[in-house]
Each structure stands twice: as structure tokens, then as C-alpha cells.
């Protein structure tokens, strides 16, 4: 059997006690744990494993223990200081979530300030001395999910 329903629930609660999880992420973790337990017991994963995990996740969501909105807020607040809106939206999309809500609006509204702060932390106040360095700084911001036009404006704005 691998994992019993109480063991599966205990594992889910242990994951949720550490941090917020998206439904997709928690389902993947639980199925993987069940698969490993079944392999250790030299058994096959039951055909209804995905349905059992989905039912458990529905139950946890109904009890308020699993919330995609809380996960999204937590993820955005944690990652936003270092990443742009495009990268954050892509990370949320990987979890099957569409960016929305007050926290997302705040992330979009502070895009310029966050990019400027990141640029300052990484390169200081000195303007880029040559085109090669300007391009390097633009690539730095773009690689972190900030819009290319914003990156160019900020880097060019640092030139004297």
C-alpha cells in the first residue's frame, strides 16, 4: 500500500507547517512520497493514488489549511525584491497559478523601484563607464525578469 491515508495527511500537514505550498506542488510531493514508500515496500502505486491525493487536497483546502492565495502572496513577498514581474509571473504559472490580487498589483506598481534598488545593490552608484558595462547591467536586470525597456532606461539614467 505504501502510505496509508493518515500517513499521507500527516505528510501534507508537515509540508504545510514548514511553508505555504501550491496545490500543484503539494500534489507532486505527496505522489512522489507515496511512490517511494510503495517502491520501498516493493508494491505498485495504486491506480487511484492521484484521486486520493486530490481528495486529500480538497479536504485541506476546505479546512483552510491549503490556500493558493496565501501561497501566491507568500511567494510574491519573498521573491519580489530580487525578481521582476515577468519572472514572478512565470514562476507562478509553473505552479498553475495566474498572478492576481493586491500583492500582484503592488509588485507591478513597485517594479521600477525594485529594479533600481537591485541595480544599486549590485553595481553601486557609479555610472557604467562604457557600452559593454551598460549592456552587462541591462542583461543583469533582464535575466531577473525586469522588462528590457525599463532596464535600458534605468541603466541609461545612471550615465552622467
Image: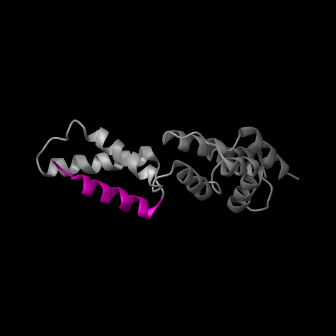
Instruction: Point out residue 139 in the picture as x, y percentages from the top left corner.
Output: 66, 44
Q: Is residue 41 above or below residue 51?
A: below
* Residue at screen point 63% across, 51% down: 83
* Residue at screen point 43% across, 43% down: 24
* Residue at screen point 45% across, 56% down: 65
Task: Give the colour scheme shown.
Answer: one colour
In which image quadrant can residue 85 be found? top right
Instruction: Point out residue 96 in the picture as x, y percentages from the top left corner.
Output: 50, 39
Instruction: Point out residue 33 in the picture as x, y percentages from the top left corner.
Output: 27, 51
Q: Extreme top residue here?
A: 47
Q: Magenta segment, which residues?
A: 1-19
Horizontal arrangement in the rendering, residue 116 relative to residue 100 (left or right) = right
Q: What secondary structure do most residues of the magenta stretch adopt?
A: helix
Q: Is residue 14 magenta?
A: yes
Q: Extreme left residue here?
A: 42
Q: As rendered, which of 43 and 127 lies closer to the eye?
A: 43
Q: As rendered, which of 129 and 55 lies closer to the eye?
A: 55
Query: How many numbered discs, if any?
Result: 0
Horizontal arrangement in the rendering, residue 112 relative to residue 75 (left or right) = right
Instruction: Point out residue 91 in the picture as x, y percentages from the top left corner.
Output: 54, 44
Horizontal arrangement in the rendering, residue 13 relative to residue 158 (left or right) = left
Amino acid at each position: 500500500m505504501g502510505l496509508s491515508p493518515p500517513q499521507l495527511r500527516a505528510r501534507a500537514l508537515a509540508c504545510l507547517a514548514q511553508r505555504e505550498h501550491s496545490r500543484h506542488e503539494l500534489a507532486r510531493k505527496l505522489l512522489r512520497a507515496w511512490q517511494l514508500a510503495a517502491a520501498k515496500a516493493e508494491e505498485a502505486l495504486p491506480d487511484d493514488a492521484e484521486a486520493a491525493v486530490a481528495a486529500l487536497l480538497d479536504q485541506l483546502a476546505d479546512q483552510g489549511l491549503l490556500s493558493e492565495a496565501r501561497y501566491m502572496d507568500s511567494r510574491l513577498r519573498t521573491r519580489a525584491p530580487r525578481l521582476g514581474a515577468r519572472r514572478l509571473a512565470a514562476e507562478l504559472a509553473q505552479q498553475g497559478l495566474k498572478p492576481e490580487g493586491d500583492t500582484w498589483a503592488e509588485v507591478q506598481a513597485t517594479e521600477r523601484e525594485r529594479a533600481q534598488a537591485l541595480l544599486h545593490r549590485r553595481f553601486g552608484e557609479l555610472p557604467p563607464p562604457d557600452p559593454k558595462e551598460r549592456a552587462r547591467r541591462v542583461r543583469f536586470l533582464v535575466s531577473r525578469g525586469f522588462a528590457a525597456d525599463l532596464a535600458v532606461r534605468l541603466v541609461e539614467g545612471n550615465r552622467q
